[in-house]
Image (cartoon, rainbow, N blue to C red):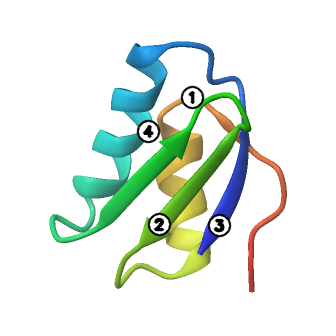
Amino acid sequence: MQVQVEGMSCGHCVKAVTRAITERDASAKVNVDLAAGRVDVESRLSPSEVSAAITDAGYTVKGVPA
């Protein structure tokens, strides 16, 4: 799934978002495109769970994929 995320601006942000998702699903594959504000996630988590993880890390999700 692909998620648009606002508020990411540096390497720390990339690590924080990646950690937030992998703490909930250790086998998740997370690829953050900082310039595009996009996070690609392969995970057993539902879209709403991925969104919640990112939001809990302090970032804003722009729309949750179905």
Position of 32 with respect to 65 (left or right) is left
Amino acid on which disc 3 is placed: Gln
Give x and y (percent) for residue 6: 75, 33
Give the residue number, with chain letter if any, for mark 2. Answer: 41
Numbered label attached to residue 58: 1
| Mark 1 vs mark 3: in front | 3
Could you classify mark 1 by the number of other residues whose Cα lies within 10 Å: few (under 14), some (14-19), or many (20 or more)? some
Position of 28 with respect to 42 (left or right) is left
Give the residue number, with chain letter if any, for mark 4. Answer: 17
Give the residue number, with chain letter if any, for mark 3. Answer: 2
| Mark 2 vs mark 4: in front | 2
Amino acid on which disc 1 is placed: Gly
Per the model, the C-alpha gap separating discs 1 and 3 is 18 Å
| Mark 1 vs mark 2: in front | 2
Q: Quadrant of residue 36?
A: top right
Residue at the spot 22% in from the left edge and 53% down from the top edge: 23
Per the model, the C-alpha gap separating discs 2 and 4 is 11 Å
Q: How many marks?
A: 4
